[in-house]
Image (cartoon, rainbow, N blue to C red):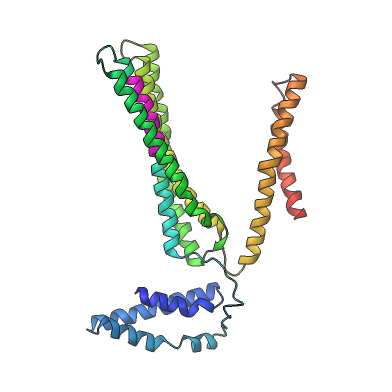
Amino acid sequence: MTIIKEYVNQVFKTVPLTEETNQLRLDIQANMEDKYTELRESGVSEHEALGVVIAEFGNIDELLDEMGISKTSSENKSQQPAMEEEAIDYFIQSKSKLGIRVGAGILSILSGIAFLLILLSVSYIIPAANIIGIILLLSGIVVGTALLVVEGMRTSNLKAYHHPFVLLPDSRERLEEERDAYKKSLTLSIVLGVSFCIMSMAPFLIGLLSAAILSVPVGIGMMLILAGIGVVFFVYSGNVYHAYDVLLTNGKSPENFEEEVKADARRRKVDYIIDEIYWPVIVVIYLAFSFLVGGWGWTWLIFVIGGVLEDVIKGLLGAWE
């Protein structure tokens, strides 16, 4: 099946990428695979079946001519970065693993601190508790930091997905369906994450109100562990959902790829001006004005005004571009 797919892709390599030609490619590939399966089930060898299939469907150029579809030369063909299904799956899986490992890294660091606090509180019972606590603290920090650093380095392999690429219509439809289906899991993860974060306050409050039941250091330690578990839910589900958003946002239709890339570049430029120039200036104005007039109780309105003006400035910059 892989050989058939590669053969069809090679034939369509110089065919302009549109929704029509993509559907034609998929139909031809499906018909060839069906014919291959039929031959194999009838007892024909693998190589012979491939030869028969390619011979029967080999003259695809005539079909393209009949449909009025002309090929382009490799010199004139626009090199559009089309996204294959395997690449799409790789990105989603990578973001999923990233979420798990980053969440685990944060949990590891918080757990190291938690175990130190818990063991320090029982050091009068266990003589070596202090040493064990320090070892667990350092171990948690080392493991957590290693996970965060390694995952940070791995994200460099995913940079291509954050730039415009051709996303075929069937791939877009599939991603939209998967994203909509994942919303239930996202909601559940958020609920669980919030629940763990809220529950994390319980041992801390118990320690404050009744030291006889639970000491404050132990309460803080348990709070950190529960909060860390909540963070894992947030980070994991957020990364998976963000993967779908990235693919659907940066994936452009083949027919209007060039125009959409230019529009995307303009939007990115405007966003850069707003995020890197406009809002830092607003913050500086807020701090300077607040120090000068001493009106910290009402100068926060500068941010409200800034938010209102942001849309106006975006519109002006967009029109100017």
Residue 192 in view, yes or no = no
Residue 74: % across, % down: 57, 78
Magenta-drawn stretch, dominant element (helix, strand or loop): helix
**Looking at the image, which residue is at 32% across and 81% down?**
36
Magenta stretch holds residue 107:
yes
Residue 161: % across, % down: 52, 56
**Quadrant hosting residue 38:** bottom left
Residue 15: % across, % down: 54, 78
For the image shown, how many numbered marks are present on the structure? 0
Q: In the figure, is residue 48 to the left or right of 184? A: left
**Looking at the image, which residue is at 41% across and 23% down?**
201
Q: Is residue 51 depicted above or below 232 in this figure?
A: below
Q: Is residue 182 depicted above or below 283 in this figure?
A: below
Q: The magenta stretch spans which residues?
A: 103-118
Magenta stretch holds residue 321:
no
**Quadrant hosting residue 207:** top left
Q: Is residue 113 depicted above or below 175 in this figure?
A: above
Residue 183 in view, yes or no = yes
Q: Is residue 63 depicted above or below 280 in this figure?
A: below
Q: In the figure, is residue 85 to the left or right of 305? A: left
Q: In the figure, is residue 295 to the left or right of 261? A: right
**Quadrant hosting residue 213:** top left
Q: Classify the position of the C terminus by image quarter.
A: bottom right
- The residue nearer to you, when weighing 131 against 63, is 131
Residue 145: % across, % down: 42, 36
**Looking at the image, which residue is at 52% across and 57% down?**
160
- The residue nearer to you, when weighing 282 against 299, is 282
- The residue nearer to you, when weighing 26 against 11, is 11
- The residue nearer to you, when weighing 152 against 6, is 152
